[in-house]
Each structure stands twice: as structure tokens, then as C-alpha cells.
Amino acid sequence: MPIKPAFTPEPAYTHGQAPRTAVLLCNLGTPEAPTAKALRTYLAEFLGDRRVVEIPRLLWLAILHGIILRVRPAKSALKYASIWTDAGSPLKVWTERQAQALQAAFHHHGEDVIVDYAMRYGSRNIPTQLDALKAQGATRVLVLPAYPQYSGTTTASVFDAVYRWGLSTRLLPEFRFINHYHDHAGYIGALTSRVRQHWAEHGQAERLVMSFHGVPERTLHLGDPYHCECYKTARLLAEALGLRKDQYQVTFQSRFGKAKWLQPYTEPTLIAMAQQGVKRVDLICPGFTSDCLETLEEIAQEAQEAFHHAGGEIFHYIACLNDSPQWVEGMRSLCLQQMGGWPLPTHQAQDLEISRQQALGLGAEN
């Protein structure tokens, strides 16, 4: 006999319930604390995702649990400790602030939209937050990954988590998914504003390096569009800034393992620039919308040290979009575009509709 899915208990629902729209901002995730124990738990889930590491499963699990989780957690904990804040992980702090600011922006324009955030790995996971949105009456959910450029290793994994939640949910909301926004005007405009603000304060460097998170090169040959979308983002940003091709450089960071990843690699490129006589570099990470370990430790600390050690003089890391007003409005514009056709009543209209239904007895079971 076929196996029936074990449906989880549903939040209270009444026939005639007014529809509500929600946005779920999904980011990668973060350990609970900058400790080896917390990193071991987090890395086991993150690196155990088939989307993240695409090598034969049994071989990888043996490597992961037999070697990596015995060595890497302690080293990673030290890196996290160097950027940890009183409010916790920077990635969590900025993602939460983005969601709060986006919620405020919708409300400012009178649009009745619920905004929440979730993490693909670790606590505050996607299933938990989807349950929370249902409990708030959300009947339509727009899933907004924090990744501007699509990759099977990131964006698709977010969608996997949503689909798995649906397997055990009886009454599913209507879903829409944002695959990518690497060339969206609101995103490019926010990046442009971020760089121009930095230049207005510090002046313009000889080179602008645009460092994106790396992925194995084989993903490109297997059809992943990530590489091409990174280069399109870089080209559009350079054009918006009026840069010539010799004034900016695209690189890829965060290589893991011995396989060949997308090139050129960030740190070796910075070292080569310094050795060739480039004295000043500005670096921005357009693929990260929130500052995190990969930007604040790997770039602002390690990459900067490598550049200086090789003879470079001035290195400026340009912060991620975080909760900048330009990016908040960019997110709202992106969401409104993707929610086309979904009614977005004002708060007043929503309250009147609820009152009307209550007066007509539509909120009662029938």
C-alpha cells in the first residue's frame, strides 16, 4: 500500500478567511555561537546538503564525519569569534533588519504584506517560519532568497526546503519563487549607490574588485547559470559606475577542497595586483546582500592582510547592501514585480473586509 504523508497539525482556519500575502526572505544560516560545538552542528547540516556538495554520497559522508567535522569546527569557530557581535552573528542581524525594514516599507506604502525571514541551515529554519506565516493567516507566500545570482547550491536548496515542508502540509499556501535578480534595476541601483557613497567619503581607488562566492567549475559545465549571472551583475554595475574594463576585476572567493573552482580566485588576484604596482584597491562582494563571515573575516581581514603583505598600500572593503534604504526599496520593487496579480489591500481595506465577514457570519464554520 502507498505510504501516506504524515501531515502536521494545521493552524486554526475558518471558511471565508481573508487572503493575506507574505514574503519570506531566506538566507543561508549561521551557527548558534562561535564555538566548536555549535560549528560542528551547523556544518554537519550545511555540508550534508546534497545540493552543496555533489560528490558520491557515501564517500562524502565518510570524509565529512571522519575528517572535516573533526578538524574544521574549531578553526571556523575562531573565525566567527573575530566578527561576532553582541547581537549575534552579523548575517542573522542583517537579515533580521532587512526583513524588518522591508515590512516597514510595505506598511509605509499602505500595502498589507507580512514579511518574515528564515535560514536554510540552523535555527529559525524554513519549515518553522512557514508554519509561523500560516498561523498569521498567510495564504500567498513569495519566497525571496538572499542570493541575487541563481545557483543550484544555494537558491535551489531553499526551494527544496519549501517543497519538503509542503509534503507534510495539508492546506498549502499559493507559492511564488524568485529565482534570481542579478540584473534587476533595484539591485544594481542599490549596489551603485553603495559604491558611490563609499567613493564620496574615501575617494576612488585604482581598481574596483567585485568578489563573488565561488562554486566548483564543474557546476558551470553542468548547466548552472551562476558564473554568467555574476559576470552580468559586474558588467551592469561597472556600466552604472562609468568604469572602463581595466578599472574593475571580477573574482571568486571561498574555495573549499582541492577541486577546480570558478576563477580567478580573489586572494591570489589581490596579491598579483599588489606585486604589479597597484597601490589602492576597493573591494565589494555583490553576491552577498548581508555582511557575514565570508565578507567580514575572509575579505575585510584575510584578503586585506594578503594585499598589504604583497606590497599594496590601501585596501577598502565596501560593506554589503545590508539594510540600506536603497536596497530596502529595491527589495520592495522586486517583490511587487513578482507579486503582480496578487491583490495587496491596504490595512484599512483589510480591516473593513474582516469586519464585513464577521458581520455576515462568514468567519464561522459551516
Image (cartoon, grey):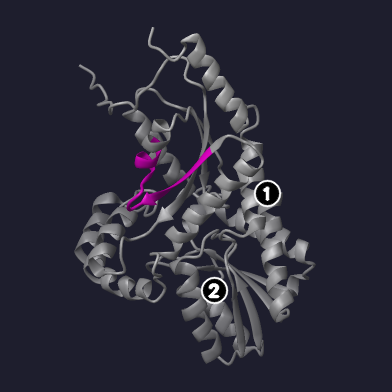
Residue 78 seen in the figure: yes
**What amino acid type is highlighted by mark number 1?**
His
Quick check: 75 left or right of 327? left
Nearer-N-terminus badge (1/2):
1
Q: Where, quadrant-wise, is the N terminus in this rendering?
A: top left
Q: Residue at x 54, y 73 (%)?
A: 266
Question: Is label 2 in a helix, a strand or a loop?
Answer: helix
Name the residue tied to disc 1.
Answer: 184
**What amino acid type is highlighted by mark number 2?**
Thr
Please tell me which residue lies in front, 364 or 64: 364
Q: Residue at x 52, y 50 (%)?
A: 100
Q: CA distance from mark 1 to mark 2?
A: 25 Å
Please tell me which residue lies in front, 335 or 46: 335
Please tell me which residue lies in front, 173 or 351: 351
Up-down relation of residue 207 to residue 349 (above or below)? below
For residue 278, which quarter of the picture? bottom right
Q: Residue at x 60, y 89 (%)?
A: 312
Question: How many labels, in total?
Answer: 2
Return the mark for residue 266: 2
Q: Where, quadrant-wise, is the C terminus in this rendering?
A: top left
Q: Position of residue 79 (x, y in %)?
A: 37, 74
Quick check: 212 left or right of 54? right
Quick check: 208 left or right of 216? right
| Range shown magenta | 114-130
Mark 1 surroundings within 10 Å by alpha-carbon count, few (fewer than 14), some (14 through 19), many (20 or more):
some
For residue 66, which quarter of the picture? bottom left
Q: Residue at x 51, y 9 (%)?
A: 360
Up-down relation of residue 145 to residue 10 (above or below)? below
